[in-house]
Image: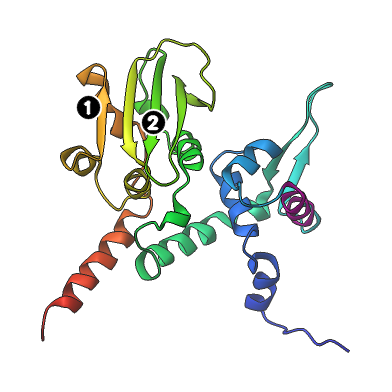
Amino acid sequence: MNHRDYCPIAASVEVLGDRWTPLVIRELMVGATGFNEIHRGIPRASRTLLAQRLRELERRGLVRHETGRPGRSGGYALTAAGQALTPIVWAMGAWAAEWMFGDPSDEHCDGLTLIWRTHQLAIPAKLPETRTVVHLVLTGVGGAQGWLDIQRPGITVCKEDQGLAVDLALEADTAEMHRWLVGLVPFRDLVANGRARFLGPSRLATAFPTWFDTAMFSHSLRRAQQRRLADAIPA
């Protein structure tokens, strides 16, 4: 007989104890609903694996699949039990930010995923009131380009040029943009160090960093930095 540990922590590990499930929950938490949309947020997971994880989360009552209108695929949403997991998943991120996190390696640098992530971190009330198109050109390891078609209350991400007039262009180093978006450095440092430069109206260039919420893990990252500085000071 295979004995199982009769413990709530053990039960939670059965649900969240693999590499991909917390990331699926993360994507649903930040607003992804369609299968392709979820997959774009976790590109390193195969589509087959993602489908398996979604079915398992449905079976466990954490995710529900909502049927789409005729001719359109349905979407996924967290159930009440799944919603109750959101503070746990954010807490996992906060813990890692303070104790296990650092600068991105070459392996982490993925320009397309970064561009996709920007639209998930958009602050609707801070976005431009009129339609604004931003062309992002990410350089260095993992470089890519994409377009942000900003129309309140959200942003559409385009990997291909749709022929829209560009209001603002931003060229920046991929690794440095990762550092900014996660909250490791302020955007002004990228500009000051020559790692990011704008082409377009100064009012849009100045406002651009304020359109996104990069503060989710900033407190944890700051505590980690303070501890490292303290440890470096001789006793």
Q: Quadrant of the C terminus?
A: bottom left
Instruction: Identify the image's colour scheme: rainbow, by chain, secondary structure or one colour.
Output: rainbow
- Left or right: 222 with respect to 24? left
Is 92 situated above or below 43?
A: below
Which residue is painted at 59% across and 54% down in the image? 23
Residue drawn at point x = 45 percent, y = 45 percent: 142
Q: Is residue 45 left or right of residue 173?
A: right
Q: Amino acid at mark 2?
A: Val
Above or below, comparing residue 67 to residue 151 in the picture: below
Q: Which residue position holds label 2?
A: 137
Q: Decide which of 156, 217 is in the foreground and name it.
A: 156
Residue 154 is at least partly visible in this image? yes
78 within the magenta span: no
Q: Which residue is mark 1?
A: 206
Toward the front, the furthest residue is 140
Say if residue 152 shows up in the picture.
no
Range of residues picked out in magenta: 47-57
Relative to the observer, which residue lies in front, 129 or 229?
Answer: 229
User: Residue 191 location, x and y as percent?
Assistant: 20, 37
- The answer to which of marks 2 and 1 sits earlier in the sequence is 2
Asked if residue 34 lies left or right of residue 71, the reply is left
Q: Quadrant of the N terminus?
A: bottom right
Kind of residue sitting beneath label 1: Thr
State whether the magenta stretch is mostly helix, strand or loop.
Answer: helix
Q: Which residue is found at the position 37% from the left and 38% from the top?
A: 139
